[in-house]
């Protein structure tokens, strides 16, 4: 065999070897980056939360038991060759690939989260509720909501933003700073007070904060939304006639003990501008963060002649309403009898 034929055969085998190596590398690359790798136990996307300082191994470990060990190793391998993970909340599709997941997390292509809060009595409850749904903690949120310079920039004269907020569901990014979230919520509050709502408040000769204050009392008086417009009409009747609101929840707020189940005469003597038995008109501010339903009830109250209300004796959560004192006393006696029968003091 001459030297030329040997040389050709060697080059042929070298070429075949190179082709095989390239094919193997291509297959590995395809397996790692192109194949479906994260079918995470269902057809719906799942949430992945990446914290500051997480490495790719940590990210891979968060993908759940339904993601195979091989796929987790693939992600850790690809990630180790490139950029670090970006903190954030991500939505991982069932057909997500390793390369797709790597690109999403390394570039910080977050999916928004929905933060929800409802009417609540304590501002601290609001701060904790928000922090449970965001990366920032409750102290950061408290600081931002009471930051005088920030509140001034948002044209909030109150000492906190909390009572200006409208309970609802909002979309933000999980990694948003507390100050960013506060600005967003302030914008939503301004948007809530549309020209129509402002016009209704003006027709009642009330400011938005006064409407909010009355709405907070309504939320404390009843958990029945269909009663809100009736209660709103009752309190507006009292305000127009110069009659003290005589709202038990304002007394409990003044005392600082809302666990009291039966308001007695001794409770009505507490000295406080929030005691609406002693002082006419609205209290200085809200006694809780009210709901949008209660605010709208004040703006669109039921028109009637009621000036008295008393909890129903069946403890249904509803109220008996009355236009006369004698009728109210009958309702009050029925409720007092029901309390005594249940030994509630």
Image: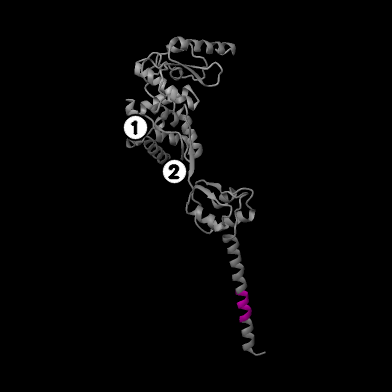
Q: State which region is magenta.
A: 11-18
Q: Which mark is residue 176?
A: 2
The residue that disc 1 covers is 198
The residue that appears at 58% across and 63% down in the rendered structure is 30
Residue at figure coordinates x 48%, y 10% from the top left = 329
Q: Report whether residue 303 is seen.
A: yes
Dominant SS type (magenta): helix
Q: Quadrant of residue 10?
A: bottom right
Label 1 crowd (10 A; few <14 / some 14-19 / many >=20): some
Q: Position of residue 285 (x, y in %)?
A: 38, 24
Assess whether mark 2 and mark 1 are in contact (beta carbons under 8 angstroms). Answer: no
Which secondary structure, mark 1?
helix
Q: Provide the secondary structure element on which disc 2 rests.
A: loop
Q: Which mark is residue 303?
A: none
Mark with earlier residue (1, 2): 2
Q: Residue furthest front?
A: 304
Q: Nearer the viewer, residue 252 or 14?
A: 252
Tell me the quadrant of the picture where the C terminus can be found: top right
Asked whether 12 falls inside the magenta stretch, the response is yes
Residue at screen point 59% across, 60% down: 35
- Picture quarter with the N terminus: bottom right
Picture layout, residue 126 above or below residue 318: below
**x then y, percent, for residue 254:** 43, 18
Q: Nearer the viewer, mark 1 or mark 2?
A: 1
Residue at far right of view: 1
């Amino acid at each position: 065999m001459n030297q030329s034929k040997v040389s050709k055969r060697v080059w042929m085998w070298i070429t075949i070897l190179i082709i095989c190596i390239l094919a193997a590398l291509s297959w590995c690359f395809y397996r790692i980056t192109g194949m479906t790798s994260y079918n995470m136990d269902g057809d719906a996307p799942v949430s992945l939360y990446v914290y500051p300082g997480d490495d790719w191994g940590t990210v891979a470990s968060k993908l759940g038991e339904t993601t195979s060990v091989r796929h987790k190793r693939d992600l850790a391998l690809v990630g180790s060759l490139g950029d670090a993970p970006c903190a954030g909340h991500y939505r991982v599709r069932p057909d997500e690939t390793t390369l797709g997941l790597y690109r999403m997390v390394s570039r910080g292509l977050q999916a928004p989260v929905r933060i929800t809060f409802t009417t609540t009595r304590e501002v601290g409850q609001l701060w904790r509720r928000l922090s449970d749904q965001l990366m920032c903690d409750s102290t950061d949120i408290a600081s931002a909501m009471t930051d005088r310079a920030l509140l001034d920039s948002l044209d909030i004269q109150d000492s906190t933003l909390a009572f200006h907020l409208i309970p609802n569901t909002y979309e933000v990014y999980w990694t948003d700073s507390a100050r960013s979230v506060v600005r967003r919520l302030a914008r939503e509050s301004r948007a809530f007070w549309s020209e129509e709502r402002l016009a209704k408040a003006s027709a009642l000769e009330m400011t938005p904060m006064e409407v909010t204050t009355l709405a907070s009392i309504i939320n404390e008086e009843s958990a029945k939304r269909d009663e809100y417009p009736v209660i709103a009409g009752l309190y507006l009747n009292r305000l127009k006639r110069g009659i003290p609101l005589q709202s038990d929840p304002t007394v409990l707020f003044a005392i600082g003990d809302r666990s009291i189940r039966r308001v007695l005469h001794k409770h009505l003597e507490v000295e406080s501008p929030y005691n609406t038995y002693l002082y006419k008109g609205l209290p200085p501010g809200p006694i809780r963060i009210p709901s949008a339903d209660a605010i709208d009830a004040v703006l669109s109250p039921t028109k009637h002649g009621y000036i008295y209300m008393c909890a129903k004796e069946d403890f249904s959560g509803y109220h008996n309403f009355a236009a006369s004192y004698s009728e109210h006393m009958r309702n009050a006696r029925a409720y007092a009898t029901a309390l005594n029968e249940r030994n509630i003091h």
